[in-house]
Image (cartoon, grey):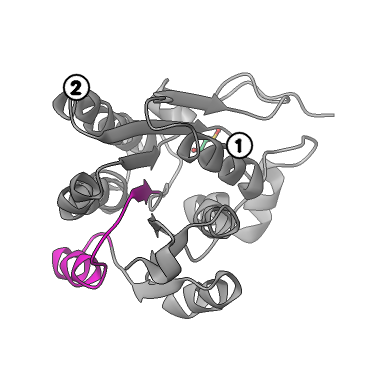
Amino acid sequence: MTANDRPTAVVTGASSGIGAATARALGAAGFHVVLGARRVERCEEIAKEIDGTALSLDVTDRESVRAFADAVPEAKLLVNNAGGAKGLEPVADADEDDWRWMWETNVAGTLRLTQAFLPKLRASGDGHIVTVTSIAALDFYDNGAGYTGAKHAQAMLHRTLRGELLGEPIRITEICPGMVETEFSEVRLGDAEKAAKVYEGLTPLTADDVADTIVFAATRPSHVNLDQIVLKPRDQASGTRRHRR
Ligand code: 8X3
């Protein structure tokens, strides 16, 4: 799907937050962007702005991924952004369904999309896989094992590709954001008020900050592979150490 000869970038989880900002930024950088998410109406609005394509995508559903990939004949860049957290409690009280959801979206979702698009990335002669993990893929913290576990597994899948695809024309970049003010905390905590408190008294990253970084990685010359980029607000030292005014 090279619309007007622009290279095609596929962004998952593109209906909001980092995914939506990345779709916009890649559109501005000259890509034809295919936006995938369950909330396809939201993707359609963004697609209109950037002359992109919106398609329905549920990364937890094999058939949905297959139909999505079938509708995109070629791709040069895949941004595995769909994912998220549910719950924040000690292992002793962890909800098994939340853990299953986190595994399905972050880990199996990344596997499905990567498998579906690898042949197209290869065929482009200059492909690139960007996976948005988290600082939760680098450390552990109390009450976060379901999410840190899923993010570690997603990161291992992604990092393993760096060796497995060595010698092929495909770059591999992992983006590890810390606190970014998006719907992330609302989904995790299931409560808008509690979510707002997460960012109180500090200046979090914005989705645009992360999107800019993804565009930077994607627009380096083909021989330059940015393996891993960690970005956190100045007010955040780790998953649990934050400075609040
Ligand atoms: C989320 C990172 O720092 O908000 O992926 O827990 S943090």
Q: Is residue 127 left or right of residue 143?
A: left
From this viewpoint, is residue 1 visible? yes
The stretch drawn in magenta includes residue 90 = no
Q: Residue 75 placed where, x, y %?
A: 30, 56
Percent of width and height locating residue 226:
43, 25
* Label 2: element kind: helix
Q: Is residue 25 above or below residue 235?
A: below
Identified by mark 2, the residue type is Gly
Q: Amino acid at mark 1?
A: Met
In the image, residue 172 lies at what x, y percent? 32, 32
Q: Which residue appears at 41% of the width and 64% of the height?
A: 5
**Residue lying at 25% horizontally and 69% vertically, measured from the top left:** 68
Question: Which labelled disc corresponds to residue 179?
Answer: 1
Residues under labels 1 and 2: Cα distance?
29 Å
Label 1 lies in ligand 1 vicinity (Cβ under 8 Å): yes
Give the tally of numbered discs: 2
The residue at the point 22 percent across, 33 percent down is: 157
Indicate the quadrant where residue 159 lies.
Answer: top left
Residue 71 highlighted magenta (yes or no): yes
- Mark 2 lies on residue: 163
- The residue range painted magenta reads 59-80
